[in-house]
Amino acid sequence: MSTALEPFRALAAEPHAYLTTIGRRSGEPHEIEIWWAFVDGVVYMISGGGDASDWVRNLQAEPTAAIRVGDTSIAVRARFELTDDERTSAGGALAGKYRPGESSWRDGFLVAYDGR
């Protein structure tokens, strides 16, 4: 667990985060509004477009990024390999936050972010 992302704990109920990636072709910053969850010191996001989403492809090319929630912005590093336990807790947290009644988005395309 990283303490670098701990400021997001107090903001976990906020509906949206803003993810800034570096464009894989342009090299320019690219910001999107996105659903997110904070679980055990890690930020998780789910891609509705799987690995074909632009923001995911940007992160695959350059995994360093920034996440902003409210006035708090933290530099992060994306990772795509999640343990089974992470998939279960992150998928459950995201489904519970955005689609109450759905048990989990465990099998969605999840991206984890650790502080860098």
Image: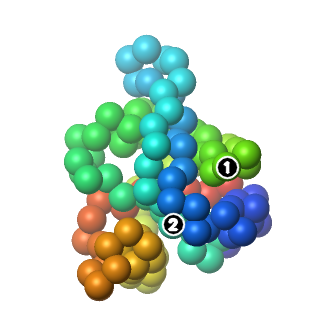
* Residue 37 locus on image (x, y percent): 51, 66
Is residue 91 visible to the viewer in this orientation of the structure? no
Q: Give the structural element (helix, strand or loop) at label 1.
A: loop
Q: Residue at x 54, y 50 (%)?
A: 17
The quarter of the displayed image where residue 87 is located: bottom left
**Is disc 1 surrounded by few (<14), some (14 to 19) or many (20+) residues within 10 Å?**
few
* Residue 79 locus on image (x, y percent): 48, 54
Q: Which residue is mark 1?
A: 70
Q: Give the structural element (helix, strand or loop) at label 2.
A: strand
Q: CA distance from mark 2 to mark 1?
A: 14 Å
Placement of 41 over or under 74, stated as above or below = below
Q: Amino acid at mark 2?
A: Ala
Placement of 56 over or under 69, stated as above or below = above
Please name which of the two marks, 2 or 1, marks the residue nearer to the observer: 1
Callouts 2 and 1 close, C-beta under 8 Å: no
* Residue 103 locus on image (x, y percent): 29, 85
In the picture, measured across the screen, residue 66 lies left or right of residue 100, that is right
Q: Amino acid at mark 1?
A: Gly
What's the mark number on residue 106? none
Nearer-N-terminus badge (2/1)? 2
Is residue 11 visible to the viewer in this orientation of the structure? yes
* Residue 23 locus on image (x, y percent): 44, 24
Q: Which residue is mark 2?
A: 37
Q: Residue at x 32, y 73 (%)?
A: 99
